Amino acid sequence: MRETRHAAVRFLATREHSRQELERKLLRHHPMHKVAQVLDELAAEGLQSDQRFTRQYIHSRRSRGYGPVRIRAELGERGIASQLIAQTLETYDNADWQQLMQEVARRKFGSDLAEDRRELARRGRFLASRGFPSWMISDYLFRG
């Protein structure tokens, strides 16, 4: 049990992990019954928290220019409950995301407006791949 806990704490010392991520990593070398018990203990002690992980993850991805659609999907892949994702994303309003999207677009494309359909489509695809919702991309592309 001590080895499993030590491994888990080592992972958590490098960065926050969701419970699912930590479980997946630990199961490579430790039995399930030990992993489950250690994860329960770490959560009870506040050393592992999906809520803290979610806040940190959103902050990190936003600072790299990713939008709410992509962040939501990535958190879901990491085992975060959709309700927790929604609650945490609600701390940012649409204006925050629109401002971020405009900054991302300005860094990528400069301040020139797109004139032809191909360029509009290219910019739209880029912003969609970054995880911004389609309605926000349309507002940006067609209303400037």
Image (tube, rainbow, N blue to C red):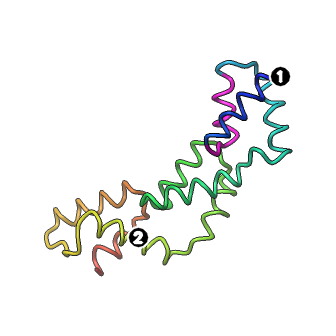
Residue 23 is inside the magenta segment:
yes
Q: Main secondary structure of the magenta part?
A: helix
- Name which quarter of the figure residue 119 lies in: bottom left
Q: Is residue 131 left or right of residue 71?
A: left
Q: Residues within 10 Å of mark 1 (few under 14, many from 20)?
A: few
Q: Quadrant of the C terminus?
A: bottom left
Residue, disc 1: 1
Range of magenta residues: 15-27
Q: Quadrant of the N terminus?
A: top right
Based on the picture, tell me whether residue 54 belongs to the magenta stretch: no
Q: Which residue lies at the image location 77% right of the left edge and 45% below the top edge?
A: 47
Where residue 75 appears, as percent x and y from the top left, is 58, 49
On screen, 68 above or below 41? below
Outermost residue on the bottom side: it is: 143
Label 1 secondary element:
loop
Q: Residue at x 29, y 70 (%)?
A: 106
Image coords of residue 9 (percent x, y)? 72, 35
Q: Position of residue 118 (x, y in %)?
A: 16, 62
- Say if 135 sits above or below 26 in the image: below
